[in-house]
Image: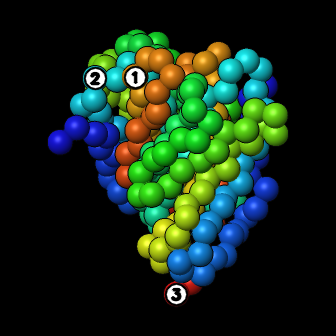
C-alpha cells in the first residue's frame, strides 16, 4: 500500500524531555511537511522540505527540529524548548507541481 | 500573502438536504485550491482541487466545489447530505512561493442530523 505512515499514534512526554515523531512515505514524493493542529486554530506549518538534505522553517518552527537524510523519511523532534507541545501533529507529502498533499494519520502528543 | 477564510465554524443540515461549506481566498496570482475532510483523531483526506479549467469541480464521495473568481470563493457542496458526512472540513490554498505548502482555513464542523 502506498501512503504516509506516522508513528506512534499516541505519545506521552514528561516536561523537559525531547521526543521524536516518525514520518515515512513510499509515494516517491519530493516534498514533505509537518503541521501542528490545535482545536479551533486549523493547521499551522512547522517545517517543510523540498529535497533531501534541505529543509525550511515554517510559521511556528521554534522548539522543533527536523532532518531529511532520506527521501522517504522526515522525522520531527519536539524539544524541551517548545513551551506548549501538547497537540496533534500531522505529516504530509506531495509531488512537485500543483498537486494535492497526502497526509498521515497523525500523532497525538501529550505532555504529562 | 496567500490566505483562505472559512466564515462558519459550524454548519448544521438535515440528512437528505443540500449542504454548502463556504470558503473565500486571497492570493496573488493563480489560485490552486483544495478541500480536505478530517474525521476525529485521523489525518486529512483529500476531497477535490481546483487548478484550472471548469469552475465546477467534482470530487470524492459526491462532493463538488464551485470556483468563483469574481467573488474569490470556492464553496464546497453536496446535493444530498448523509449522516456519515459529519466531520471537520478544511479549505486550503497552495503557496508555490514556499515549497508548495498548503495554507489552511480554520475549518468548519459539519453536522448532519437524521
Look at 73% across and 38% down and name the residue there.
B68
- Which chain does the residue under circle 3 lie in? B
Which is more foreground, mark 1 or mark 3? Answer: 3
Measured as percent of width and height from the top left, residue B24 is found at 76, 43
Q: Which residue corresponds to mark 2?
A: A28
> Is the residue A91 above or below the residue A32 in the image?
below
> Is the residue A32 above or below the residue A60 in the image?
above
The residue sitting at the right extreme is: B71
In the rendered image, residues at marks 1 and 3 fall on the same chain: no
Q: Which mark is residue A95?
A: 1
**CA distance separating discs 1 and 3:** 40 Å
Q: Which quarter shows the N terminus of chain B?
A: top right
- Decide which of A84, B47 is in the foreground and name it: B47
- Which chain does the residue under circle 2 lie in? A
- Decide which of A44, A86 is in the foreground and name it: A44
State the SS at label 2: loop
Does any portion of residue A66 appear in the rendered image?
Answer: no
User: How many numbered markers are drawn?
Assistant: 3
Which is more foreground, mark 3 or mark 2? Answer: 3
Q: Are marks 3 and 2 in contact (CB under 8 Å)?
A: no
Q: Is residue A102 left or right of residue B57?
A: left
Mark 2 crowdedness (10 Å alpha carbons): few <14, some 14-19, many ≥20? few
Does any portion of residue A22 appear in the rendered image?
Answer: yes
Q: Which mark is residue B114?
A: 3
Measured as percent of width and height from the top left, residue B20 is found at 66, 61
State the SS at label 3: loop
Q: Are marks 1 and 2 in contact (CB under 8 Å)?
A: yes
Look at 79% across and 56% down and name the residue there.
B7
State the SS at label 1: loop
Amino acid at each position: 500500500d502506498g501512503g504516509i505512515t506516522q508513528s506512534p499514534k499516541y505519545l506521552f512526554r514528561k516536561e523537559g524531555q525531547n521526543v521524536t515523531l516518525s514520518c515515512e512515505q513510499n509515494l516517491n514524493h519530493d516534498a514533505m511537511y509537518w503541521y501542528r493542529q490545535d482545536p479551533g486554530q486549523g493547521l499551522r506549518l512547522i517545517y517543510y522540505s523540498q529535497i533531501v538534505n534541505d529543509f525550511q522553517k515554517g510559521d511556528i518552527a521554534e522548539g522543533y527540529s527536523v532532518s531529511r537524510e532520506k527521501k522517504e523519511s522526515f522525522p520531527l523532534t519536539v524539544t524541551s524548548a517548545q513551551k506548549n507541545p501538547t497537540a496533534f501533529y500531522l505529516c504530509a507529502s506531495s509531488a512537485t507541481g500543483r498537486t494535492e498533499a497526502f497526509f498521515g494519520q497523525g500523532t497525538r502528543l501529550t505532555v504529562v | 500573502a496567500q490566505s483562505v477564510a472559512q466564515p462558519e465554524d459550524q454548519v448544521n443540515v438535515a440528512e437528505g438536504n443540500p449542504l454548502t461549506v463556504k470558503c473565500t481566498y486571497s492570493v496573488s496570482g493563480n489560485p490552486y485550491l483544495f478541500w480536505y475532510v478530517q474525521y476525529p483523531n485521523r489525518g486529512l483526506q483529500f476531497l477535490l482541487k481546483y487548478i484550472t479549467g471548469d469552475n465546477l469541480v467534482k470530487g470524492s464521495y459526491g462532493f463538488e466545489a464551485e470556483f468563483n473568481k469574481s467573488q474569490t470563493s470556492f464553496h464546497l457542496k453536496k446535493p444530498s447530505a448523509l449522516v456519515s458526512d459529519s466531520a471537520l472540513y478544511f479549505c486550503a490554498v497552495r503557496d508555490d512561493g514556499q515549497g508548495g505548502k498548503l495554507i489552511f482555513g480554520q475549518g468548519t464542523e459539519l453536522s448532519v442530523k437524521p
